């Protein structure tokens, strides 16, 4: 599913940025399996969310200019009837 692939790419991107081991934009895009233009879009989206991502031309890597971490977790579980009755975020069908 595309959503899980996107989340995995964001998590990998975050890990590589924190390790300061992204390489050039071309290398990074290849490493996470997207185009360079899509990489720039992802980085811009993360910056809009407050991620202090900068690029070092000397070290050829992206890094965070301040302490920062992205954590995206998806949990999938089967809900039992008693848990379904406790939900208040939508319609209930019984």
Image: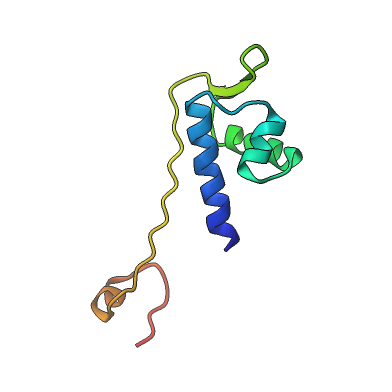
Q: Residue furthest top?
A: 58
Q: Is residue 85 left or right of residue 2?
A: left
Viewer-closest of 25 and 48: 25
What x and y, as percent, mark residue 75? 38, 59
- Residue at position x 48%, y 34% in the image: 15
> Looking at the rendering, which quadrant does residue 92 occupy?
bottom left
Q: Quadrant of the N terminus?
A: bottom right
Q: Residue furthest bottom?
A: 94
Q: Quadrant of the C terminus?
A: bottom left
Viewer-closest of 48 and 74: 74
Q: Is residue 57 left or right of residue 46?
A: right
Total marks drawn?
0
What x and y, as percent, mark residue 10? 54, 43
Q: Residue furthest left?
A: 82
The image's colour scheme reads rainbow
Q: Is residue 69 above or below residue 82?
A: above
- Residue at position x 27%, y 73% in the image: 83
What x and y, as percent, mark residue 84? 31, 76
Q: Is residue 9 above or below residue 69?
A: below
Viewer-closest of 7 and 86: 7
- Residue at position x 23%, y 78% in the image: 82
Viewer-closest of 70 and 5: 5
Q: Is residue 3 left or right of residue 27?
A: left
- Residue at position x 60%, y 32% in the image: 47
What x and y, as percent, mark residue 63? 55, 23
């Amino acid at each position: 599913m595309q959503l899980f692939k996107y989340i995995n790419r964001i998590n990998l991107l975050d890990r590589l940025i924190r390790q300061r081991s992204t390489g050039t934009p071309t290398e990074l895009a290849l490493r996470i399996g997207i185009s360079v233009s899509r990489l720039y879009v992802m980085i811009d989206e993360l910056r809009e969310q407050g991620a202090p991502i900068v690029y070092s031309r000397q070290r050829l890597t992206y890094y965070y200019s301040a302490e920062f971490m992205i954590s995206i977790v998806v949990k999938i579980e089967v809900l039992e009837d008693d848990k379904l009755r406790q939900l208040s975020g939508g319609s209930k069908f019984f």
